[in-house]
Every structure is written in C-alpha cells, then in structure tokens.
Image: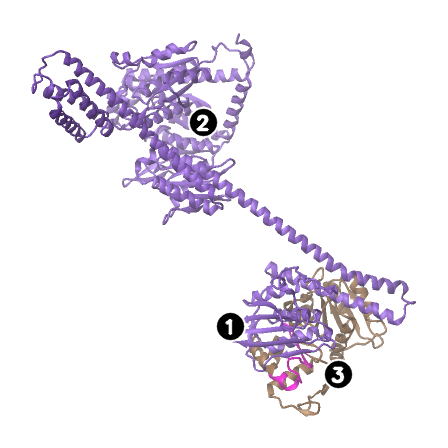
Amino acid sequence: MRDDETQRPSPETLLRVAQAEEAQAAKGKLKIFLGYAAGVGKTYAMLQAAHERLHDGRDVVVGYVESHDRSETDLLLEGLEVVPRALVEYLGVALPELDLDAVLVRRPQIALVDELAHTNAPGSRHPKRWQDVEEILSAGIDVYTTVNIQHFESLRDVVAQITGVVVRENVPDSILDQAVEIRLVDIPPEDLLQRLKEGKVYIPEKAAHAAENFFKPGNLMALRELSLRRAAARVDDQVRAYMESRSIAGPWPVAERLLVCVSGSPFSETLIRTTRRLADDLKSTWHTVYVETPGGGKQIQENRERVWKDLRLAESLGAQVASLTGASVPEALIDYARKNHVTKIVVGKPTKARWREFLRPPLVDQVIRLSGSIDVYVVSIAPAETVKKEGVPHAAGKRPPLSGYLKSLVLVLAASLVCQPVHAFLAPTNLVMIYLLAVVLAALRLGRKEATCTAFLSVLAYDFFFVPPRFTFAVSDTQYLITFLALFVVGVVISTLVSQTRERAEAIRQREAQTATLYYLSRDLAAVSGLDAILDALVRNIEESLQAQVVVLLSEGERLEVQAASGGFTLGAKEAAVADWAFRNRAAAGRGTETLGSAKLLYLPLQASGDVLGVIGIRFREEREFTSPQCRRLVQAYAAQAALAVERAQFARQAEQAQILKARESLERALLNSVSHDLRTPLVTITGALGALREKGVELAAEAKSDLLEAAWEEAGRLNRFVGNLLDMTRLESGALKVKESPTDVQDLVGCALAVLEPHLGRRSVEIAVPAGLPPVRMDMVLMTQVLVNLLDNALKYSPPASQVEVSADVVGERLIIEVCDRGRGVPSADLAHIFDKFYRVPVPEGAGGTGLGLSICRGIVEAHGGTIEAHNRSGGGLRVTVSLPVN
Amino acid sequence: MQKVKTDGGRPRILVVDDEAAILRFLKSALPGEEYSLHFAENGHAALAAAAAARPDLVLLDLGLPDLDGVEVIRRIREWSTLPIIVLSVRDREDDKVAALDAGADDYLVKPFGVAELQARIRVVLRRSLQQAPEPVYRFDELEIDLQRRKVTRAGTEIQLTPTEYDLLRLLANHAGMVLTHGQILKKVWGSAYADQQNVLRVTMSNLRQKIEPVPSRPRYIITELGVGYRLKSA
C-alpha cells in the first residue's frame, strides 16, 4: 500500500537531499577519526591521511595536534605546516589553544584539529572545541579531527554504566552526523594494553593510573564494540541515504517517527538519550516536546529552566523540538503526534507512589488510552544520579522560612482565643468554622505549606481546647474524629486551591508585566519617527523594564557602528568584536550564550524581514538574568520589535531621500526650462537679424541694417552675460567658487563695477556717495564687483531711463554697508523676501526680465563673505538693496 | 632681436586655435591687406611655427588639444620675447594671471569684439615694433613726459612721490597693456615685494586721487579685476 511512495522519492525527500547537498557544498567537509580509547592511533592515522592529501596537492595545515610526546606522531608532524597555537591566559597560566582566527585567516583547504571533545580554556570564543570546528566548517574549510567514542552525548550514560567513569567532555551526536566520512581507527584491546605498558600511550606514572581505572580489558572491549557499532550504523545511514536519493527500493520499514515528552523531571534527560538510541536503531526521526499546561503555577516557573535545558539537549541529539500548550498533557501530546505522523511514543515507567495514581492516573495510562494506532513504548528509567551531579544545580524547591510556621501557630492561637469567650454559646462544629477561617487566612497570606500546617495545628488546638474532655488530646466522643478529619481535609483542600489561585495570579501578573513592557515599547516605537528617536525609545524602554544597560549597533555598509547606548556606556574593542560575531553569524553571542561567553554583554542580532540590520547588546544587572530563558525570550521579543522599528525608520529615510530627489528633479526641470528659454530668446533675435542681412542684405536700407545689427549685438551680449551667470551659479553651488579675501579699496570696487557697466550706462546718471578715506575692507574684490554689477544692472533695467541710480558705501560700526537704489516701480512686498531665490522673477511688463539668477548669485557671494543682503521698497517709489559685510 | 619683414610690411600674425569657426572669424576680422596670417592648430605646431615663420605676434588659445596654452607661452618665452595675446574662454582671474605671469602680453576673453581685438593688437605691435620708446605719453588730458619726469593734467602739473611716478611710468611704458599685480610689484618695489598687494593698492589709491578727476570712476588707470592694472592708450 505504501509501495508507490517508496518506489519514487517524494518531492520532500528530494528537497531534503538537495538541501543537504547544497549545505555540504558551501560548508567544509568533516572527516572524523573515531577511536575507542586513547592510544589506538587516531592522531597518527589523521596525520598519515594529511600527508596523503598533501601529496595529492591539497593545502593542508595543522590547526591543533597534541602529540603527547609520542615520537611516531612527532615524526609525522614534520613536513606539515602548523598554525601557531593561541595562548589563552587563565588564572595566571597561559593555556595553549587552537587559534581559530589564525586558521580562518590562513584559509587552508584542509585543517587538522585534534581532540574534538576538548574543552577550551575559559575566555576562548567558544567553550568547546567542536564549536570551533563548526565555525571552521562554516567558513568552507575541510576539517580532519579525532574523537573517542565515549565522548558522544547519546552514549554518555551507557559509557558511565560500563566504565563507572562520568565523561565530562561531550560532543553532540549531530556533529557525527555531519561528518562526510568516519574512519574507524581500531586495534585489538590486547595490543592497546601492550602499547600502554610500553609507555607509548601515556608517560609511565600516568599509564599505571590509567590501567587501573579506565584501561581494563572489559572496558576496552565494550567501548570497542560501541565504536564499531556506531561506525557500522553510520555506514548503514549512508547506504540508506544513497538508496533513498536514487530511489532504490530498500528493505527498510515504513518510516518511523518517535515522540518523547519531557517535563523537566530528573528523568527527562535519560529518557531523551534512550529515545535517541531507539531512534538510531529504528533509523527514524524523533521529536521531543514539552507541554505547558495552564495553572502550572510557581512550580512550572522553576521548572522552565530545566525543561529548556532538556529541549536543548534533545536538539543537540538531533531531535525536532517543540513547546506546546494545552489543557491536558496527554491530549496535547496525542494531538501533536497525530499531526506529525508519529508512530511511536516513548514514555517512562511511572515512579510515583501507588496511592497518588488514585487521584490522577499516570501519564502512561492516559496516553495509552488516547493513543489509538500509535504504539506506546514504556521504558524503564533509572534515576541517573551519576549523571545528574554534573548538571547545573537545580534550584531546590523553596522551603518556607520558619517565621511562616510561627505565623500559622499565632493564627491558630488567635482563633482559639476568639473561640474561648464564645464556645459556651456555639455548637462545637461552628467553632470549626473559625479555625477554617484561620486556614483560609494562612493560605491567602502565607502559602500552601503554612496553610496545611495551620490546618493540622487547628485540629490539635480544637481537640485540646474545646473537645471534651478539654485541655487534653483525649476524645470522649468518637464522632469528633469525623470533625477532625473534615477540618483537616477541608483545610488542606482550601489551602491548595487558594495557593494555586495565588500562584496562578502571580504567574499571570508576571506575564502581564512582560506583555505590558512589550506593549509600551511598541507604543513608544510607533509614536516616534526618525531613527534617532526610535533608538532613543528603545534604549529607554529596555533600561526601564529590565534595569539593564543597552547598546545598539547598526551596520554602516560592512561595519557596525554604535548608534545609541545607555548613558555613559562605551563599547570596548573586545566587546565590539563579539557584537560583530553576532552580526555576521546571525546568532546570539556573548554572556549567557555558548559563543564568547566571557563577554560582558549579551548580543542579539536585529533580524528584520530582509537582512540583519545590526546588533543589540544588553548588560543585565544580575548574573542569573543572562541565562534565564524568560529574560532571553523577552530580550528576543525586544530585539524583534526593535528590528522592525529600525527597518521602518530606514524605509522612511529612503522614502525621504526619494522625495528630496524628486524635489531636486523638479528644480532641475525648472532650471532646464529657464535655461532653454534664456538661451533661445537671444538666439531668436540674433539668427533673425543675421538671416535678414544674409538674404536681403543689399536691398535693406542702411538704417534698417544698423538696427538689425544693433539688436543682434545686444542680444549676443545678453547671451554672454547669461552664460556667465550660469557658470557662476554652478561654481557657487558646486563649492568651486572660493572666496579670496584681501583688503580692498571700496572706491576702486565701485569704480570697477561702473567700468564694467560703462557701455550700458549711456546717458543714465549714477550718483556715487563713497566717502574718501574709507578704510580698506577685506573681501574678494572680483566677486563683490560682480555683486555690485548685478545690482546696478538690475537698478538700471527696472527703472525709467531718465531716473537716477544711486550707489553709496560707508562703514557703520563694524559693518560695511553698500546700498544700490533706483526709482523704479519697486517690488510687491510679498515678493521682497523671494527676489534673491534662484529663478525667481518679478513679472515685468516690458519682458525685459533677467535670468532670475543675478540676485541669487549676489546672495550666494554675499553670504559666502558672512554678510547679508536685503531689499526694501523706498518711500517715494523704487527699490533699495542693502549689502552688509563684516569689516573684520 | 632681429625683426624680419618680408610680407610687404604687413605684420605677421600666428593664430593658434583649433576651432574652425574662430579661425574663420579671425580671417575676416584681420584682413589680409593689413596682416599676414599664419595658422597652427595645436601647441606643438605653434611652437614649430613660432620658430620657423618668425611671426611678429601670436594669437594664442589656451585650450589646445595637445599642450596647455600656458605651457606654450612658457616654451616660447624660453627663447623669444615675441608678443603673445591670449584669446580664451577661460574668464577666471587665476587663468589670466597665470598666462600673463608666464609671459603673455595681453589677455582677451572670448567672446570679444573685432574693434577690441584690433586695438589690442595695435598696442602690442606698436610697442614691440618701435625701435625707440616714445618719450611722451598722452591720453585725453593726461600727459606724462618721461624724459623730464613731468606729469600734467589739462596743463596743470601734478606732484607725485617717486614711487607713484615709478608706478605711473611703468604703466605708461606698457600703455594699453595689462600688467599683473605681481609684475608691477616686482618692477617697482622689487622681487621681495611680489606678494605685498597692500603696498600697490595704497599707492594706486593715492596716485588715482592725484591724476583722476573722479577717483571713483577712473578714466586713465583701469583696474583689471583680480589681475592688475592697465593704463589706457589712444
């Protein structure tokens, strides 16, 4: 029935194969030399292989090889290029380590890195060497490495069982899966023991110690079997992958999918490892899920960290992990299983006391009842004590302080005191109500354990003080036993209910607080526009809600630059390097992470819809916040919001630039229009006049001829002036116009301007008022002459031919004031402010309009001198233009 | 230097320009009955022609395809004092000063009128072709008797300080031609003063107060903006 599906690889399969091949092509290839114990000759085999590759013409370097002073190994190292080791200072000792950056910079084709399971010295970029290897692979460099079988994560407890030694240096199984080739380096245990005796493995004193502990024939045989099996399984996998990709129908069974549920209990870890081994045996994929139920309360909060760690372990062992929410664990589990076509669910044997099953049936039973067609594997799980010791010490359940119990005692005594005066009038059962009140109060104010204690004390007090015979614990009427039981049970139930409600409320309050801070952030981010304001709001919000220091770095081209930071915060070169790593690798780095954990801050990439925009760095006040998953989640949420806001700001800036570009374009269009108009108009007259002279030169009267010539001559002059203006404007705007100031005789300045205009002056009278003996004023005489020429030209052009034009100059205080006045019609007051704008023209009836450039050139030049230029209408008609220049 | 006149007494002018339209315009502006015209279209041809044809005057464009015009001036000046008038569209003062300081005798910005060009050519040729300098300069009402060191305006003698007189004499010796600030300073005050424009400006202001009827609208000594001064000539 499934035959059709197995005949031909499904698109999904092909895609997976293609993706895997693609990833392999970009990444370097990993070759692992696998052994079952030290001294089997892994390093030797690796070096031999390296020499072979070198002989093939490949570029091979030694990243890190430990020869343990074995002469054979040392001999093989000769002829190979060795990257110098990095010395990492730790506690005053310089520890030799793999120099990761040196290898990345050197970029060989193949790098040799010995001892994959090695733990790096604190302060290195990654805590583990296998992480260094992953980075080298990511850079596209092939890696040869060595490792012993006992270092694999999934085999840790098996090895611990066999040898009684807990291996502390672990390598995730996923790295073994990545390996393109696994070379099993194997010698019989007897030979290995012989070598040990000969001192070829360890130096003699160490060898004796090793022989006693680890190198027992039994151990070695078991480890050898493990490694052989592991290598065989690996070959099997490769065969399978090959057949799958080429659609060779194999003898393998229908694909299995395993599912294991973790709860954060001490057994979860063992359960995960067991499932992984099972999955390996079945050649199946496997899922690990965690189900969060509402009302988990405080216990769940404490549990989270453990769950998180479990999920990470599962992920490192190759599982697909998920965190679910649901009303009941078994229902959510089965639901997930069905959706993901899980064929087998793995659960642990129940370990709880039998009586508790009466209240709530164990998970196993519930799952089996709901599972339907899904198989359920029940595995026995020995509490992995030896393993547990290594784990992070879990926060022990909080024990209520002694004062809590004292308070419950006081409560009970108070209840007794209240009962004392009224017990004569009330039935004894009603007195019980007063004690229940005390229990409720304790549950509300103190907590569950204290409330239970209160219930217990209440029973005692009630018995002692009010149940006849009074002031003894003896009971005359056995009916009271029912009252005692009821009081106690009701007390316990109430206290449980009340405290659960309280814990839930607390959890909700916390979640609410987080939601609120996120809401405030998003509100603040939405309210502001502009990158600076957004970064400001971001930094402020995170500072306030997390009580942390923040730094935001954004990419400027290829580099990261600090754009915003908490007050007084500076980023050192080392921290900047960590931020850079986070940016380039698109992953969290720094304190609290696996990468560069010795940094002072935690860095998260700001990943927006497109690219990584930058990095946000956070320095919490308390150390535990760096590793707390809640804090990490919150910060990740912040980073996501921040990335969106920054992206929005960048889009806005792009839009703004587009608008500026548009405005510039429209200005350029205006300029082109104006230029083409001003260039063509004189040409019309010139070509017209010349055309007439050319065609009818002989017939024309002398007067007409001279008129035509005069017109053409004038227009040619106008054209020349316009081109000059245009050039000046261009120089002014491009900044090519340099003001070369030198002391200038103001009289000479006025004289020069008038000399330029001499041909146009005709009979116009120009009144000059420049007092003799004016001190020289620093200015660029050439440019200022041009200003004066333009102003005078305008004055002459826009005033009646018979009227007078006045020029005056004087030093008033610290300023040189030059005024040019005419008796024309002036300028409408609304236009006065604009006449110095580019291409602004006051409409003139005669059409004698200028280029609209002259006055704007004046303003450009005057302002370049640090002066001002203004225009006012004169009383009695006409325009007065005032130029004011600083004298010094 | 030896002056050779073999073109029937007509001064020989070497026109260096690569624009056909300009050449055509110059041909009609400088009629063959007055001048003998020779042409060169680039800097190297100009240098060769200047040596071979021995012109009396070079009209030089600065924007040549191979050599910069200023470089052409410099190379000609290495061996000859033959007059050079620059005709260029470059209207920036720096360009003018560079050409004049390199040794050009005058500078005319394109576009220019035919009358203007002819006047400049006349001034330059008169100065270079005359055997002995004129002893008296006259323009309008101003008269400078170089022999007797006497300056009069409308018959009234004007008293000048020795420096003012030196300045005026220098301008009169180059009447009609522009002299750059640097050239004037070097010749009147000495090389050490080449950058002391203040000295020149003050002296010029004083000189103008004495010889100009309206100092703010000078009639005799024209300021060439950003370049230097020119004493008008008939």
**A729, B151: nearer the viewer:** A729
Q: CA distance from mark 3 to mark 2?
A: 97 Å
- Residue A334, located in which quarter of the rendered image? top left
Whether labels 2 and 1 share one chain: yes
**B200, A720: nearer the viewer:** A720
Q: Is residue A280 left or right of residue A399?
A: right
Residue drawn at 39 percent across, 33 percent down: A633
Q: Is residue A698 left or right of residue A175?
A: right
Q: Give, as a three-letter code, the residue at label 1.
A: Asn
Colour theme: by chain
**Residue positioned most to the right:** A699
User: In the rendered image, which residue does mark 2 sit on?
Assistant: A30
Q: Give, as a three-letter code, the residue at label 2.
A: Leu
User: In the rendered image, which residue does mark 1 sit on?
Assistant: A888
User: In the rendered image, which residue does mark 3 sit on?
Assistant: B131
Q: Is residue B209 magenta?
A: yes
Give the residues in magenta: B206-230
The chain that appears purple in the image is: A
**A704, A384: nearer the viewer:** A704
Label 1 secondary element:
loop
Q: Dot 2: few (<14), some (14–19), or many (≥20) neighbours within 10 Å?
A: many
Image disc number at residue A228: none
Whether labels 3 and 2 share one chain: no
| Chain ID, mark 2 | A
- Residue B186, located in which quarter of the rendered image? bottom right
Label 2 secondary element:
strand
Q: Is residue A126 left or right of residue B71?
A: left
The chain that appears brown in the image is: B
Q: Nearer the viewer, mark 2 or mark 1?
A: 1
Q: Earlier in the sequence, mark 2 or mark 1?
A: 2
Residue drawn at 7 percent across, 20 percent down: A471
Q: CA distance from mark 1 to mark 3?
A: 50 Å
